Amino acid sequence: MRILIDCDPGHDDVLAILLALAHPEKMTIQGITTVAGNSTVEHVTENILKVLDFIGVSIPVAMGCARPIRREPEPQPMAHGESGMDGPVLPAAKSKADQRHAVVFLQEEIMRQSEPVTIVSLAPMTNLAMLLTTYPEIKPHIKQICMMGGSLHGGNILPRSEFNIYHDPEAAKIVFESGIPIIMSGLEVCAEAKTMLKDFEPLKHGGRVSRLAYELMDYYSGYARERGWDYTNVFDAVPVAQMIQPELFSGAQYRIDIETEGALCRGMTVAQPCEDSFPERCVTVLEHGDGIRFSELMLDALRILDQTQPD
Ligand code: RIB
Ligand code: CA
């Protein structure tokens, strides 16, 4: 399966990309596009270029939208630091981003494939909305969108809104109304896909990739440790894990509408069980996941990459 990953690295974005890289038998990353979210689009682009250089992997990276369609950017330094990936100290990237804007890159990369491509969305959906609006003929060439975002009940930025949707609700509305098949990993399934902090401790003695993952998790789990939690949620790794081992997850079909107004509910994903009357709007929403096996999958991936990308 050829995939394109749209992201805002982002500690959990990076771990999701590492998980994908460890399973070439399941997926090939054709390209990575970046968008403003956790930090500025410049920062998140530099972050992924640094990571790919550091682990010795060459994948085209194209920088995308610097701001949401309508809203002001709201970076998340409290979770990811000013850079969007505080913690690891990596050499400056030698690789350069593709000259094309992410939206042009996505259009050209998708159209040159003989088979429809899967898009993995791990960030605000600004690039994807611009792609679908600018090039509506692209839709049949997109097999599905596997995305992290939204929720059935909870919120992590507002009481009922998750960050990726909240940051650009107008973009999410365009994507969820596009008719493209979507597999949504929302906050509920991410909450069950826990990663235990004790499992990451030994990684600091591992290979290059494990040490990077340890430094990412050491910073990223600070929020959890401050609250006395012994786990953290690697949100963005969940849609990738579902593509690798779907049997770890279960879900149901819902119609998802995006609230774009309201001070309290902006970015809320309003879910209705999919009756026959909504067939064209049905989205697969993951609701449950096997947290232990998810964590094993993540740790196994790092061990694999320590072998394939040695020091
Ligand atoms: O709500 C979690 C999402 O917001 C993840 O994609 C994380 O990287 C942040 O962007
Ligand atoms: Ca992200």
Image: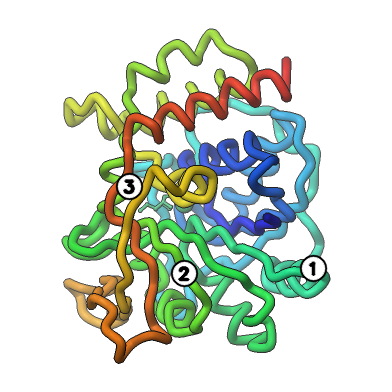
Residue 43 pos. (x, y %): 58, 49
Q: Quadrant of residue 156?
A: bottom left
Residue 294 pos. (x, y %): 40, 35
- Residue assigned mark 1: 113
Residue drawn at 62 percent across, 81 percent down:
139
Q: Residue furthest top?
A: 205
Residue type indicated by callout 1: Gln
Q: Determine crowd level at label 3: few under 14, some 14-19, many 20+ residues with C-alpha closer than 10 A.
A: many
Q: Quadrant of residue 152?
A: bottom left
Say if disc 3 is inside 8 Å of ligand 1. Answer: yes
Name the secondary structure under disc 2. Answer: strand
- Residue assigned mark 2: 182
Depth check, mark 2 against mark 3: the one in front is: 2
Residue type indicated by callout 3: Cys
**Residue 30 in the image: above or below residue 180:** above
Q: CA distance from mark 2 to mark 3?
A: 16 Å
Q: Earlier in the sequence, mark 2 or mark 3?
A: 2
